[in-house]
């Protein structure tokens, strides 16, 4: 007897289902009436055995993204006969039992309906519906997300069936990264981190698939929960060998298991890695670090006499803000939540934080990489023309993101606000030089049509070589960012630079550069106010005397006072 779907999916709903618009456009897909109660197999479409060979079974249920890609690929094909053939093939796949099953499993996944998904799967096995990796991945995902004994049991059964199919009936289902990662999660839920780790190694060494960070987390979390520090370090080492960087959550796990197991050398290592890759920590990590410094274990670790010259040399070599020579001092740590004053002096211990250097060569390499990316994403000739213009008129002391500045605190563009920001930036210049203003062509055209004073101001900026108008269809972010980095100057903008464009730039150099060069703005009763970059680096710092200062994350409100964890003890 069929179970009633809890997400209210009926045959009537299924018949009335309208495919995505792109599918309708390219396939002229029409729903058909159904003969029987089985929502997968008993359509009036041909039986699967008549049309599904081995290759077709593996691709019977293309998802929406694949259909979109195929649609785009044949849009330029003007052969009507070829297009009709493609449409017929797409419709056949979409309306096949395998395609309908994938659609239904997608609904189950959306509604987190494990019971209905398992019923559909069992029915598909009875009716010999071909399954591919997408079917299995949806089923395994639901099993892993259910947090129930049923999901755990059936998840391993489904995976075992997938493997048995590969060796018995000739229909080869090749697992992908999502398959192995989901099974690793199931293994962790079974409290078997060894199996989770074995699955990751099988993915890499047996199938040649590069694991993602999410693939390692189940094994790492499982070992850390069990207090198996050495096994957790083994997973971490495997990640490093495969160029997978741990983030704050993973480093916090390793910090906790090191703390609990009394591995003081590893605690020190994890703090240094947090400094290098995370820089500022969330509240949970900050609390964990406070617990460590307040513990009996931390009180008993450290050297009393250290080589001051060697420490200073290490600080210089590392660019400032850390030395990496281990714990200094003995006895209890004084742990306080505090703030820094405007000059970077800790209000708790009186120690001054430093501004960590950026290697000039690193800046040049980053500018070169940015130029390459921009030429790939923008019209190459337009960006090369901008670079030539910049060489002629630059360098500048500041670059102004015109569109962002003109929109601060309102939904419309305010030219006078941009003009005020330009005047403020000019006052910051040692030579009283105008900053470079980057504006889109559409924005400039609008100002020409509007206030005559704005037109005069734009002409003055342009004649002074202080205005660059980006062409129609371009993304002006590439232009103002490249100008600021290549000129090694200040960047005036409230853009937090977190969208996909800036994700392409990586997470190592860019946050450090932004911290030292971005000037933010706020609107007050007296007009615009500049918030200059701090004279110290907002990053975990380890002093030459062995004290630590750990900054916490404050979000996008740059006017909120940042909290720091200060940990110090008697200085030598």
Image (cartoon, rainbow, N blue to C red):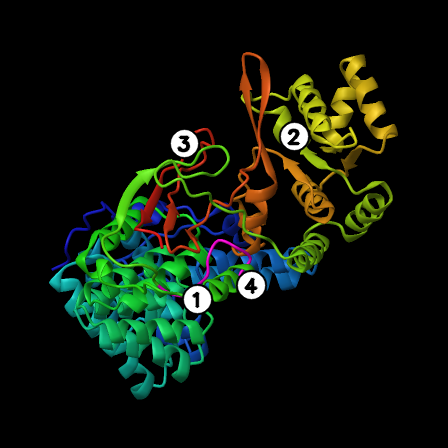
Q: Which residue is denoted by mark 4 in the rendering?
A: 317
CA–CA distance in space, label 2 to label 3:
28 Å
* Nearer-the-camera pick, 496 or 227: 227
Which residues lie in the magenta part? 317-326
CA–CA distance in space, label 4 to label 2:
40 Å
Q: Residue at x 36, y 76 (%)?
A: 49
Label 1 neighbour load within 10 Å: few <14, some 14-19, many 20+: few
User: Which label sits on residue 403?
Assistant: 2
Can residue 257 be seen here? The reply is yes
Q: Secondary structure at mark 4?
A: helix
* Nearer-the-camera pick, 308 or 481: 308
* Nearer-the-camera pick, 251 or 31: 251
Q: Residue at x 32, y 49 (%)?
A: 568
CA–CA distance in space, label 1 to label 3:
36 Å
* Nearer-the-camera pick, 382 or 93: 382
Q: Earlier in the sequence, mark 2 or mark 3?
A: 2
Q: Earlier in the sequence, mark 3 or mark 4?
A: 4
Q: Secondary structure at mark 3?
A: loop
Q: Nearer the viewer, mark 1 or mark 3?
A: 1
Q: Nearer the viewer, mark 4 or mark 1?
A: 1
Percent of width and height locating residue 346:
40, 39
Label 2 neighbour load within 10 Å: few <14, some 14-19, many 20+: many
Q: Earlier in the sequence, mark 4 or mark 2?
A: 4
């Amino acid at each position: 007897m069929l179970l009633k779907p809890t997400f209210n999916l009926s045959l009537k709903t299924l018949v009335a289902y309208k495919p995505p618009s792109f599918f309708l456009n390219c396939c002229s897909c029409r729903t058909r009436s159904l003969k029987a109660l089985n929502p997968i197999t008993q359509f009036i479409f041909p039986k699967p055995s008549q049309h599904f060979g081995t290759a077709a079974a593996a691709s019977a249920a293309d998802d929406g993204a694949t259909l979109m890609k195929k649609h785009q690929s044949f849009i330029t094909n003007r052969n009507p006969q070829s297009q009709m053939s493609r449409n017929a093939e797409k419709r056949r796949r979409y309306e096949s039992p395998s395609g309908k099953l994938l659609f239904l499993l997608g609904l189950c996944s959306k509604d987190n309906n494990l019971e209905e998904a398992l019923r559909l799967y069992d029915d598909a096995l009875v009716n010999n519906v071909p399954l591919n990796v997408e079917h299995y991945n949806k089923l395994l995902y639901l099993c892993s997300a259910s947090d129930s004994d049923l999901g755990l049991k059936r998840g391993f059964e489904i995976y075992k069936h997938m493997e048995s199919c590969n060796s018995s009936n000739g229909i080869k289902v090749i697992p992908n990264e999502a398959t192995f990662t989901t099974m690793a999660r199931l293994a962790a839920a079974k409290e078997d981190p060894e199996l989770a780790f074995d699955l990751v190694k099988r993915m890499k060494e047996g199938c040649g698939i590069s694991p993602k960070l999410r693939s390692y987390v189940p094994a790492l979390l499982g070992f850390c929960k069990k207090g198996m520090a050495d096994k957790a370090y083994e997973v971490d080492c495997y990640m490093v060998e495969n160029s997978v960087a741990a983030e704050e959550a993973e480093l916090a796990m390793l910090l906790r298991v090191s703390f609990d197991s009394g591995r003081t050398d590893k605690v020190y290592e994890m703090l240094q890695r947090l400094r290098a890759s995370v820089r500022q920590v969330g509240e949970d990590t900050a609390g964990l670090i406070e617990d460590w410094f307040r513990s009996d274990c931390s009180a008993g670790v450290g050297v009393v006499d250290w080589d001051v010259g060697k420490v200073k040399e290490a600080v210089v070599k590392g660019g400032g803000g850390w030395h990496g020579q281990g714990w200094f001092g003995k006895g209890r740590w004084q742990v306080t939540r505090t703030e820094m004053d405007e000059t970077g002096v800790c209000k708790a211990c009186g120690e001054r934080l430093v501004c960590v250097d950026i290697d000039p060569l690193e800046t040049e390499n980053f500018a070169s990489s940015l130029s390459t990316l921009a030429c790939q994403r923008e019209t190459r000739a337009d960006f090369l023309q901008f670079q030539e213009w910049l060489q002629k008129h630059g360098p500048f002391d500041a670059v102004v993101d015109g569109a962002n500045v003109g929109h601060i605190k309102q939904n419309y563009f305010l030219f006078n606000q941009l003009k005020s920001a330009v005047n403020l930036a000019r006052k910051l210049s040692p030579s009283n030089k105008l900053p470079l203003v980057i504006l889109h062509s559409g924005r400039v055209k609008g100002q020409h049509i509007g206030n005559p004073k704005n037109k005069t101001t734009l002409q003055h900026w342009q004649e002074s070589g202080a205005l660059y108008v980006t062409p129609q269809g371009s993304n002006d972010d590439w232009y103002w960012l490249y100008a600021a980095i290549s000129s090694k100057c200040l960047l005036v903008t409230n853009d937090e630079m977190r969208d996909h464009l800036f994700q392409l730039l990586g997470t190592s150099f860019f946050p450090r550069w932004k911290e030292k060069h971005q000037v933010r703005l706020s609107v007050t009763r007296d007009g615009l106010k500049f918030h200059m970059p701090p004279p110290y680096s907002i990053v975990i710092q380890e002093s030459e005397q062995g004290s630590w200062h750990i900054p916490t994350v404050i979000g996008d409100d740059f006017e909120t006072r940042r909290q720091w964890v200060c940990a110090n003890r008697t200085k030598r």
